[in-house]
Image (tube, rainbow, N blue to C red):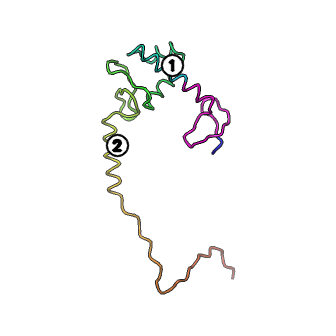
Amino acid sequence: MAIKNCKSCGKIFNALTAKDRICPICKQADVANFKKVKDYLYKNRGANIPTVSEETGVPQKDIVRYLREDRLEVADLSEIGIPCERCGVNIKSGRFCKKCLSEMNKELTGAIKSSSPLPRIPSADKKSNKMFTADFRQRRS
């Protein structure tokens, strides 16, 4: 467990996991806001982000975050979207478009294949079982 400051309200809280960024109180509020947005979109398919924000009272930045986290997806018929973080093309949810994901996957795979292997550590002298340590203290004359 670690003590962190809530990214939402700034209060100190005890984070149970490394992923916890907001306190339990703000997390409950976030879950409630997500439910409001989800219910509104279920009844009003194709609504844009400003309208959803205005009707539900949930800030636009939170709605965009839900889209980036793949918790929501823009309807197929809708012309709105969020920009791919790499090339800027409109996408329905997530952070990157399919083309950029494919390119980044190829780049990563190529980087892994082209990387040189780790240098080998010379094996210990089999005749001697002695261990040596380095003495970094300066010797005085």
What residue range appears in magenta?
A: 4-31
- Where's residue 126, x and y in %? 46, 84
Question: Closer to the observer: label 1 or label 2?
Answer: 1
Residue pictured at 52% horizontal, 15% vertical: 56
Which residue of the protein is positioned furthest toward the bottom in this rendering?
Answer: 127
Magenta highlight on residue 50: no
Q: Is residue 21 above or below residue 114?
A: above
Residue at label 1? 36
Magenta highlight on residue 28: yes
Residue type at numbered disc 2: Met
Which of the image's four quarters has the N terminus? top right
In-front residue for pair 25/96: 25
Residue pictured at 31% horizontal, 51% vertical: 110
Residue type at numbered disc 1: Lys
Tell me, for residue 24, which label it has, or none: none
- Circle 2 residues within 10 Å: few <14, some 14–19, many ≥20: some
The CA span between labels 1 and 2 is 35 Å
Q: Secondary structure at mark 2?
A: helix
Indicate left or right for 40 with 24 as reference.
left
Residue 99: quarter of image = top left
Indicate left or right for 17 with 76 as reference.
right
Q: Secondary structure at mark 1?
A: helix
- Circle 1 residues within 10 Å: few <14, some 14–19, many ≥20: some
- Where's residue 130, x and y in %? 55, 83
Of the two numbered discs 1 and 2 on the same chain, state the one appearing first in sequence.
1
Residue at label 2? 104
Residue pictured at 44% horizontal, 72% vertical: 121
Indicate left or right for 63 with 91 as reference.
right
Residue 42: quarter of image = top left
In-front residue for pair 101/70: 70
- Where's residue 40, x and y in %? 46, 16
